[in-house]
Amino acid sequence: MNATERRVLARSLAPLPEESLSGFLLRLSYRLELSPARIGKLCGCSALQHRLPADYLLALPSNIASAFANATRLSAPEVQALTLTGSGLSTRYTPLGATRLDRGGNHAAAQQRWALSLSSRFCPQCLAGDGTAVQDRLGGPWKLVWHLPVVVSCTAHGRLLSPCPRCNKVPNRSPETERSGLLMRRTVGGLHPAQCVNPCAVPRPWHLRPPAAAVLDSITFPALQRSWGRMTWIAC
């Protein structure tokens, strides 16, 4: 199925300023009550075994970008702006310019060069949104700039970027047993975009462990309880 034949999604979203492709997929999958892997397939950007390739964080091939734009009713520039290269960050941060993630171990090399990280720390106030109806429901943006290892703070809110308060790890950190991809738990639907999906430390295979379930979009993490539709997540 080519881009012109691909089915258009019943509903889509407008990208938020500085939003990453992974963050956009999380918000869209939650809105449509589908898994990120299913959204990726409908938008023409999933690969073998419903993988969402890690190199899509850097840039989308033109045919993939065209299919994605058609399915989500976005323009090609809007789609490419969800990537590090398309957003213009690679021209301002030189280690990105020579980085590719489509050949196995290049992600580890990219981390060693301080080019990027697939996982990222975050600003809770950015994830809480700006008070608009759509951001109150779906959360604020997971920002592209948070994937740059040299970025350690949010200048908009004057605070350091944080790890998950429950598991104390960087959200979306892929376990060693899973090939690196754009998102962890991509086949699981119903997870809020501001929920940590790192597996809890329980004695099970990593893919069977429940997510940490910490809500990441509040400054006051202890005893936080937020209700999202039919689901309630309780942070540590």
Image (tube, helix red, strand yellow):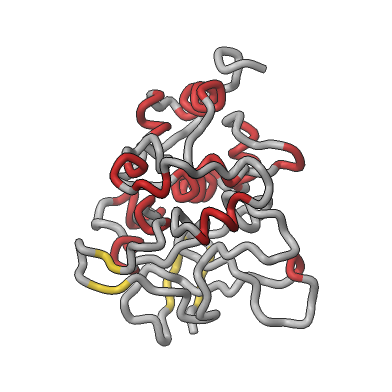
Return the x and y of residue 17 as percentages of the image width and height: 29, 45
Q: Residue furthest top?
A: 4
Give me the residue at 39% from left, 73% from top. 162
Give me the residue at 79% from left, 71% from top. 205
- The answer to whether residue 34 of the structure is visible from this angle is no
Image-based side of 117 in relation to 159, left or right: right
Depth check: give the residue in front, 48 or 233.
Answer: 48
Return the x and y of residue 51 as percentages of the image width and height: 68, 44
Depth check: give the residue in front, 69 or 73.
Answer: 69
Image-based side of 75 in relation to 157, left or right: right
Q: Is residue 198 above or below residue 119?
A: below
Image-based side of 183 in relation to 93, left or right: right
- The answer to whether residue 154 of the structure is visible from this angle is yes
Depth check: give the residue in front, 50 or 108.
Answer: 108
Return the x and y of residue 86 as percentages of the image width and height: 38, 35
Give me the residue at 72% from left, 72% from top. 209
Which picture quadrant has residue 67? top right
Question: Total label count?
Answer: 0
